[in-house]
Amino acid sequence: MKAVAVFPGSREVRVVERDAPRIAQPDQVMLRMLDIGICGTDKEICSFEYGTPPPGDDHLVIGHESLAEIVEAGPAAGRLRPGDLVVPSVRRPCPHPGCRACRLGHQDYCYTGDFSERGIKEAHGFMTEYVVEHERYLNLVPPDLRDIAVLAEPLTIAEKALEQIFWVMRQRPPWLDPETPGEERGRGLSALVLGIGPVGLLGAMALASSGFTTYVYSRELPPSPRIDLVEAIGAEYVSSQAVTFADLAEKIGNIDLIYEAVGHSHFALAALRVLGTNGIFVLTGVPGLQAFVEADPARLMREMVLKNQVLLGTVNAGPDAFASALADLGEFRRRWPAVVRTLIAGRYPPEQAPDLILGRPAGIKSVIAFDAPA
Ligand SMILES: [Zn+2]
Ligand SMILES: [Zn+2]
């Protein structure tokens, strides 16, 4: 069977032939991979900045955003059956008995760093025809989400952040009532999204559908399909090439939430200066090596204390975030059917993966499908 793999030693990315996997343990299932999404992490891996093959292998099969169909289930796989659609999670637990996070099934909070991640770190990924996986790492997908469920994994970033944001809001005045319907939890509050890539856009959709008055701030200038998308979901786009942070803060008023999805430290630091009273700042981007800048840490610290601010970093996601992401994809389609139709830029055969990964992203999300016409 075919797979798309990166060879860090020889610095190559190409389609390879591999043996099809077999079910070896009773709780495993065989997956036929339907859609595999491409993202910035794949670009970093294929630029050899990141990504580690499994021990003993010279290559890593890439792909971590996916949708699959179960084609065979082991005798102890009781929850899922052939024909079911699933989205696999990405991170697998570390082996250390003392890691309380991993031992509780929350490897997204792993303490040791010795986890593996499919398609990223020491475990082959999903950009291949068949995969064998333990049932417990799979999230069941409603059949009517077949065309968009590949977006669930990138949406889990926002969902895990929102779980924590709403938890914090429940602990602080005016105390968000846990019974508040999903679409009203952000009512009366402003959210500023930094970045207009897939994580930023999916985050903006999640925030707007939770009732936040949502702004998206990035370098891009119109015309752009991404800016059109922001406007189509009832959020407002502001370009950093036209409006400064100070003017943006003046326009928005108290900025209650900043959701960073760029991975640029200078930009994030500038944004922290305009975070409002009782504001929550969520960081999701992973910056590479960047130039040093002068900062005024005393001012940042003073503001954070005097304004009761929260700074929250978040990575990866657990089963609750996957369930929320799948529920929200259905909600997005009910609210914005025309927008949702534009999210997937196209489905392409695996031979085109290297160019798509390393080229400039077109549209919102490009997807590899092994049955796509060449
Ligand atoms: Zn990704
Ligand atoms: Zn761990």
Image (cartoon, rainbow, N blue to C red):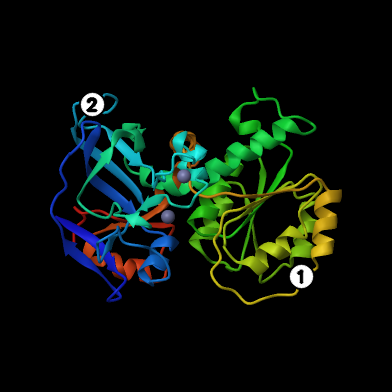
Residue 194, given in percent of the width and then of the height, sits at: 62, 58
Rate crowding at label 1 as few (under 14), some (14 to 19) or many (20 or more) other CA atoms within 10 Å.
few
Amino acid at pointer 2: Ala
Above/below status of 333 relative to 281: above
- Picture residue at 44% right of the left edge, 57% below the top: 364
- Picture residue at 39% right of the left edge, 47% below the top: 90
Above/below status of 246 relative to 306: below
Q: Nearer the viewer, residue 335 or 246?
A: 246
Residue 102, given in percent of the width and then of the height, sits at: 46, 40
Q: Is residue 326 found left or right of 175 in the rendered image?
A: left
> Of tags 1 and 2, which is closer to the observer?
2
Residue 78, given in percent of the width and then of the height, sits at: 26, 24
Q: Is residue 198 visible?
A: yes
Which mark, residue 295?
1
Q: Is residue 303 found left or right of 319 in the rendered image?
A: right
Q: CA distance from mark 1 to mark 2?
A: 56 Å
Q: Nearer the viewer, residue 10 or 283?
A: 10
